[in-house]
Amino acid sequence: MNAFRTALPAVYLSLLAAALLHPAGVSASGNGSGGYGDNAAVFGNQNRSRSSSDGRSLNDEQRYLLGREIYSAKLGCESCALGGAPLDATLAGRVMSEPELMAELDKKERAMVEVYLKRRFRL
């Protein structure tokens, strides 16, 4: 069960990255429309151009959700940098103010995690 909990965020993150990076979108509905099915509200219109590769073309909700997944998969898990410590406003403030805590994340991932933490804890 513990291995499943650890692997699950990585699977979601991989699927989300594939959906965001693939220019034609992902058809979850199977009707050939190229839509995202039930996730259309989260991912928006896949036909919209993605002129920015650093996440600027994503809306705030998408950045928040992606940041939450990245935090869970790369920082907050028991084998990750923060050792599974419960996320609260104090820890979120530390993560934001101590760059070495997010050292394993690339620039885009750090930006997404910052959006998540700022919005969740109103930092």
Image (cartoon, rainbow, N blue to C red):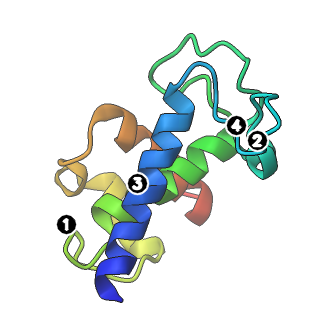
- Estimate how packed mark 4 is, as few (under 14), some (14 to 19) or many (20 or more) residues with alpha carbons within 10 Å: some
Q: From the viewer's perspective, is the residue at label 4 or at label 2 nearer?
A: 2
Q: What is the x, y in percent for residue 110?
A: 36, 43
Q: Earlier in the sequence, mark 1 or mark 3?
A: 3
Q: From the viewer's perspective, is the residue at label 3 or at label 2 nearer?
A: 2
Which residue is found at the position 48% from the left and 51% from the top? 67
Q: From the viewer's perspective, is the residue at label 1 or at label 2 nearer?
A: 2
Note whether residue 92 is visible: no
Looking at the rendered image, the quarter that the N terminus falls into is bottom left
Q: CA distance from mark 3 to mark 4?
A: 23 Å
Give the labeled residue for mark 1: 81
Q: CA distance from mark 4 to mark 2?
A: 6 Å
Q: What is the x, y in percent for residue 4?
A: 36, 78
Count of marks, rendered view: 4
- Estimate how packed mark 3 is, as few (under 14), some (14 to 19) or many (20 or more) residues with alpha carbons within 10 Å: many
Q: Secondary structure at mark 3?
A: helix
Of 68 and 91, the residue lying toward us: 68
Which residue is found at the position 39% from the left and 83% from the top? 86
- Estimate how packed mark 2 is, as few (under 14), some (14 to 19) or many (20 or more) residues with alpha carbons within 10 Å: few
Q: What is the x, y in percent for residue 33?
A: 82, 28
Of 4 and 70, the residue lying toward us: 4
Which residue is found at the position 71% from the left and 45% from the top? 28
